[in-house]
Image (cartoon, coloured by chain):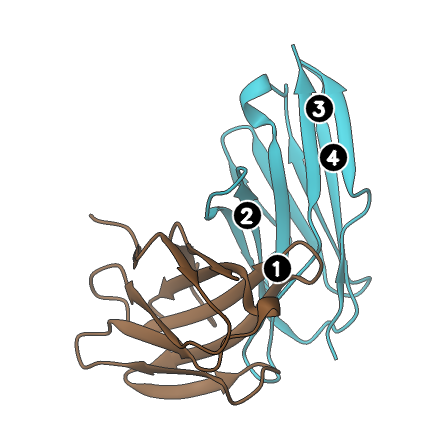
Chain colours: A brown, B cyan
Amino acid sequence: KAGVTQTPRYLIKTRGQQVTLSCSPISGHRSVSWYQQTPGQGLQFLFEYFSETQRNKGNFPGRFSGRQFSNSRSEMNVSTLELGDSALYLCASSWDPRHYEQYFGPGTRLTVT
Amino acid sequence: KQEVTQIPAALSVPEGENLVLNCSFTDSAIYNLQWFRQDPGKGLTSLLLIQSSQREQTSGRLNASLDKSSGRSTLYIAASQPGDSATYLCAARQAAGNKLTFGGGTRVLVKP
């Protein structure tokens, strides 16, 4: 069974640009969550989607948005990039994270210059 | 607001010694607690998931306990090996808001 996949793995953008990251969950999983990991703040929750609906959102500005498609694949978008957005963005999938494990992908390393 | 703390931030042990990793959380209203391993520059690998109704979970050399009343979880790794060197993270899924809150992690080095 294939694991969680994220594309692209590495990305370099300049300030002011926007970026879209993609996540394909494990087959059958309906929940996809996104996290940001930085050396200073650690791992922080961005948002969770379940059956195409955003079920929960972390404390991030509106520049961070996401969506989930009918096949459970998810994308997150960051507009007007800032230097502080440089981070490892991790996606996780689960049957239902309230009761089952979350499985993480390898992440997308975003560098903003 | 849930806060998850892992102390110490780093740990170095000789090969063969048992590892004890601590995790504390402030809000006991959780669905579950999950332990992860992260190798440098990589994603997270799930190690164990403990439901709020459980006291412990075991997988091979790993054993994790959960004490909701005291807000603590402990991960035990028996007979450590150099390949166990990594950062270990615990995360609590809180009932309010249904989100996963992570600790800062414990970086473990097992010396041959």
**Please, is residue A54 above or below residue A18 in the view?**
below
Q: Nearer the viewer, mark 2 or mark 4?
A: 2
Specify which label sits upstream in the sequence, 2 or 4: 4
Specify which label sits upstream in the sequence, 3 or 2: 3
* Residue B38 picture location, percent across and down: 54, 42
Amino acid type indicated by mark 2:
Phe
Q: How far apart are marks 1 and 3 (CA)?
A: 22 Å
For the point 63% across and 21% down, the residue is B80
Q: Name the residue under label 3.
A: B18
In the rendered structure, find residue B20 and report the number of the disc placed on it: 4
Chain of residue at mark 4: B
Q: Mark 2 points at which residue?
A: B36
- Disc 2 + disc 4, Cβ < 8 Å: no
Q: Residues within 10 Å of mark 3 (few under 14, many from 20)?
A: some
Q: Mark 1 points at which residue?
A: B91
Amino acid type indicated by mark 3:
Asn
Chain of residue at mark 2: B
Amino acid type indicated by mark 4:
Val
Left or right, A96 with reference to B93: left
For the point 63% across and 19% down, the residue is B79
Specify which label sits upstream in the sequence, 1 or 3: 3
